[in-house]
Amino acid sequence: MTIAQMAELALALVLLVAGIWFYRRPSPDGQPGGQGAVLLFVVAALLAIHGLGLMNYHPSAYEIEAGRK
């Protein structure tokens, strides 16, 4: 795991905690939640997925073989 991936995971964790805090904090009308918290959850999930390397491209055996010809 590279430094950049660790930084992405750390930032994802910070955004997740911020999203939880925003979601739990009551708004002026007394209702919890909000679009900002949901957006933070989505961005945190994307950063975590990318930081874990789940978006990296891995060619299949067929693609490797086709590239050799």
Image (spheres, rainbow, N blue to C red):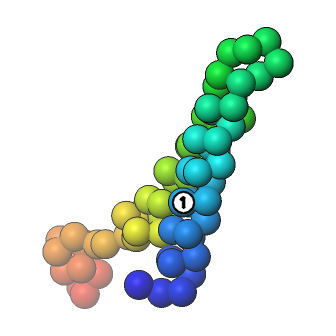
Q: 17 and 63: which one is in front?
A: 17
Using a 10 Å C-alpha cutoff, classify the residue at mark 1 as few (fewer than 14 neighbours), some (14 to 19) or many (20 or more): some
Give coordinates of residue 47: x percent, y percent.
54, 60
Q: Residue at x 55, y 69 (%)?
A: 10
Q: Which residue is identified by label 1?
A: 13
Looking at the picture, does residue 29 appear above or below residue 8? above
Residue 45 sits above or below residue 13 on the image = above
Local secondary structure at mark 1: helix
Residue placed at 54% from the left, 60% from the top? Answer: 13
Q: Is residue 46 above or below residue 22?
A: below
Is any atom of residue 34 visible in this view? no
Q: As rendered, which of 23 and 44 lies closer to the eye?
A: 23
The residue furthest right is: 28
Tell me where residue 60 appears, x and y as whole percent.
22, 70
Q: Quadrant of the N terminus?
A: bottom left
Q: Is residue 27 left or right of residue 60?
A: right
Amino acid identity at mark 1: Leu
Q: Answer whether residue 55 is visible to the viewer in this image.
A: yes
